[in-house]
Amino acid sequence: MRKVLILFLLTNLLLTSCGSTELWGSYDAYLTPTATRPPADPDPVATQTVTPTAEAAATLTPTRTSSPAASPTGPTASPRPTFLYAAQSGDSLEAVALHFGVQVDEISLNGSTPAIGYLNPGTLLEIPNRLADTTMTPSVQLLPDSELLFSPSSVAFDIEGYINDAGGKLSTFREWMTFGWVTGAQGVERMAYGSSISPRLLLAMIQYYTGWVEGQPFPQVDETLVLGYQAPLYPGLYQQMRLAVRDLEAGYYGWRAGTLTELTFQDGTKLRIAPDQNAGTVALYNLFARRLNQAEWQEAIDANTGFMALYRRMFDDPWERGRQVGPLFPVNLIQPNFTLPFEPNTLWSLTGGPHPAWEQESALAALDFAPAMSDSGCVESNAWVVAIAPGQIVRSEGGYVVLDLDGDGFEQTGWVVLYMHIATKDRIPNGTWVDAGDRLGHPSCEGGTATGTHLHLARKYNGEWVPAGDPLPFVLSGWTAHYGDAPYRGTLTKGDQIVSASQSATHESNIIRSPDE
């Protein structure tokens, strides 16, 4: 009878999951989508406010030299029957097939394919050349993946020190957020840690569009819509960085998944992406394509005179740092043993199958779980969220807890697990070492917009969000995550058992961790 009552209560738990329309708001405790009136700044900074124009953005490109802009690659005069391609870090057969416009079974491999996981970097693939008559972007790679993400190459980078040494407006800039005044360095740091985008890239982007890092504002920079995104609901530097991060993540993770194979420019024209590109370069391609027409885009992505010329001047050679880091996903990468994130013999529900880890455009790397409760919505829960593996807590604040599995204290390296919506009450302190099963805190709605008390769980490796489904699925106590026909849907399976995600916490979504798991 007690079990029946619990199940009845759980079925009344409605919409207990992350917000599905404004995902960033779901994962930043200090973010509001609209401006609020700040108190008087005890140390105000003089500002300039003008209206940005499309022409102004073009003037922010560094001065051109005699080097020609990179141009799209046209159809080849004598197409090759096949293309020999060396797999890159993060490649899967399915994504590579989509990049090249072929079927998976048309690809020949020189070597074995992992049963589970990504293709090993350097694996040679022979692929039919179906794109010989297609106009494409250049094949020149602009930026290593490790420079696009908050990866091992960012470990030693001092955000505040760099900004202060540069001495531009950003070093004295402050803006109001819901919890208080934030400096330019604090805003960039928060964005880097939250989105897992490189702080170097964020600073180069700010300099490119505003001039703030190394000097004062370029002419016609609007301090409300700082980066030129015409979105009044996203005012100020931090909010405008959000929009840029969305464009970067849409390019990076869209390429990783194979769902993005062509660019759509501001004027609506399209261009196929060269199939041998890397995700970091595609992220930059997408950032500029969404704001420019093709001619302007070609100038922005010119390796000698465009954005990357500025990037190299600010931060030296990114490829040298990339070589030191190596591929983000090493050979034969596997997931460590993970348990379900709650205690044994307690009733929970899978309320969200694979869905975005951070912004709507990021990898479908997260799963949502909710405990059985007598009331729906954002109510206090006594259920415990636990460590899914041993490691060190490296962040614990604002609704989130971050578990570093390699114990080096850096989120940029190795396996890292993100727990979101962890209540302040009883939340584990930062710096604590834990074993699998140790209590971390209670699920809640803290940490941003949520439709009900729950836990949001996601994985990263070397700064890259790892999708919860194939090719390296999230496995918890032997339960394997699978994609559904849309984000938030999907399943967990174990043998012949199936748990189906449901925000209404139906019977099919119930899951109990057994004592031996």
Image (tube, rainbow, N blue to C red):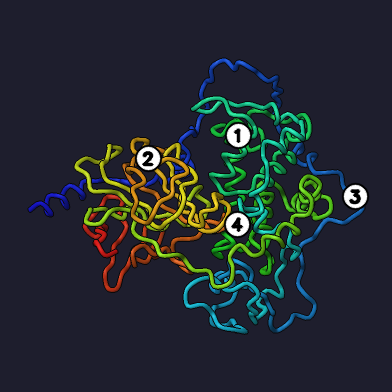
Mark 4 or 1 closer to N-term? 1
Which disc number belongs to residue 427? 2
- Is 277 drawn above or below residue 401 in the view shown? below
* Res. 480 image quadrant: bottom left
Q: Amino acid at mark 3?
A: Thr
The residue drawn where x is 48% and y is 32% is 32
Q: Position of residue 353 (x, y in %)?
A: 37, 57
Judging depth in this view, the residue of 122 and 157 nearest the camera is: 157
Q: For the C terminus, which image quadrant?
A: bottom left
Which disc number belongs to residue 65? 3
Q: Amino acid at mark 1?
A: Gln
Give the spatial CA distance, label 3 vs label 4.
29 Å
Q: Position of residue 21 (x, y in %)?
A: 44, 44
Which disc number belongs to residue 186? 1
What SS does tag 1 mark? helix
Mark 4 or 2 closer to N-term? 4
Q: Position of residue 25 (x, y in %)?
A: 46, 39
Residue placed under numbered mark 4 in the picture: 252
- Is 115 drawn above or below residue 264 in the view shown? below
Give the spatial CA distance, label 1 vs label 2.
23 Å
Give the spatial CA distance, label 4 vs label 2.
33 Å
